[in-house]
Amino acid sequence: MRRIFCVAQFTFRELIRSNMLYIWFLSVVVFSALAFLLSILSFGEVQKIFMDLGLVGMEFSGLLVLILSLAVTYNTEFDQKAIYLQLAKPITRGEYLLGRVFGFFSIISLVIIGMGLFIAGLVTLVGGGQVPVLFVYSTLFLLIEMFVLTTLGLTFQMIGTSMVGVVLYTMFTIFLGHGMGQVDWLLNQKLAPTVKTMLRIVHFLLPNLEAFNLKDRIYDPNLVLGWTQWQEVLLYAFAYSFVVFLIGWINLEKREFM
Amino acid sequence: MNWATSEKPFKYAALSLTTFFILQVFLCVNLDKWVHPEPFESSQAGQLDPKIVSSLRAAALLSGYKVLVGHVFWIRVIQYYGDGSNGADHYAKLYDYCRLASDLNPQFLPVYTYGAAALAYQQNRMNEGVELLQKGILANPTVNNLKLMLAAMTYHNSEDYAKEIPFLEIQIAQGNAPTMLVNILANTYTKAGRIDDAIRLWRQILQTTDSDVQKYEASQKLKELYAIAKKNPSEKDKS
């Protein structure tokens, strides 16, 4: 456990030194400006616009940190061979990968929570409004989503042979993962059996990111979110991350560093 | 476990992988039931370009930023209605624009209140206004504003202005009503013969609005209303 923590701490520091926190400042400025602009141009419901755009900004900044971190660490670990130093230490490759996951996740969480606090502060202190409970839940769902994507991104890093490949795989998975709701809808339509089978395979292989997408529904009166749903989402995130982590681990074990 | 010399760890890994994969598949199927409780359904393109509509929906649904696309598209709707050159065909695409905006962002109330008010009161397309409001009420069953507006529009359609006024008044008093609705209430006061109330409201609009167009409209209306009040002093006394 201590070894995992050490790798996580090292990764966290490495990413801080790579100026990843600037993304937080950038996102705060860009999304606040965008929210302000939209609320001026639009009619009414300024608070809703701020909340919606804030959540979009939180997810966007998290994804940006993840993708840039993957690119930066691929360069240092694999291209500049820094991974040799780490694996030469008394640490298993599984511990190394898990430590990396936690290190990535801590910096992404820092950015997301920081941005969330800024948005909530802006709405309550400046706007005089109230932060709905679903905003908090939505942030937690966002963190769960980021954990799944971090594991997936690092697995791609273990499988991929180039930085561009890792970034592209991750980005496509994010897009397709958000399209799972429509795949689900397509599965209920009249389609050729082969197409349905293919869609079903895609549906089960890719992460269902719509399961974590509460940000589009924080004002939806039809939303049901009880303990059962929390359990299902947490279990799903854990099961999916575990499968992906195992694939990454096996690939790292099989990988030969020459 | 030594992965390099033994095959055993791979067997364990394969077993765990299969077990957890089956678990995530099972959970994924369950998740869909509450994540998407209603089947995906969207309005037809109507008079809008189907290519634009499809691209917009694809961008919204695949990026996972449906509400953001909805907010940005809503600005486009406002621009469309604000552009006088579209008035040549009486803003024929307004209803389709509003429907698309509400597909993308069903919980954003200005789409319904502003859209329905523009369609029903300003463009005299009561049926489309009512349909838009009905869609809004179904998507937001707990919101009273939309129900009040529907009631007001129904009375307006039957020219029962006296019954329409309280619904508009309550809606405006609750806040978050579009400015256009205040103008509509002022005009309805005039139609119902409540000239004093109409004068009071137009004066309030003149004092509070930032829009030059609205200031001009309010001053014109006030001129007309003062003229009416001068002609019929008995009306003023009555009210």
Image: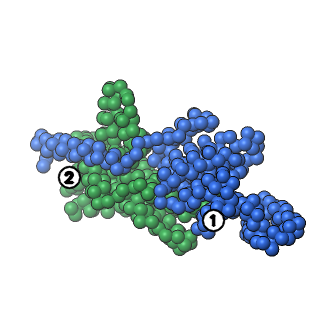
Q: Which residue position is annotated with label 2?
A: A92
User: Could you say which disc has been placed on residue B166 in the image?
Assistant: 1
In the structure shown, which secondary structural element does the residue marked by tag 1 occupy?
A: helix
- In the rendered view, would you say A65 is above or below A250? below
Label 1: chain letter: B
Q: Nearer the viewer, residue B168 or A33?
A: B168
Q: Colour of chain A?
A: green
Q: Quadrant of residue A90?
A: bottom left
Under mark 1, the amino acid is Pro
| Marks 2 & 1, CB-CB < 8 Å contact | no
The answer to which quarter of the image holds residue B169 is bottom right
Q: Chain of mark 2?
A: A
Dot 1, how many residues are within 10 Å of its Cα: few (below 14), some (14-19), or many (20+)? some
Residue found 39% across the figure and 38% down from its top: A185
Q: Is residue B19 left or right of residue B164?
A: left
Quadrant containing the C terminus of chain B in the rendered view: bottom right
- For chain B, the rendered hue is blue
Residue B109 x %, y %: 56, 56
Q: Amino acid at mark 2?
A: Thr
Q: Residues within 10 Å of mark 2 (few under 14, many from 20)?
A: some
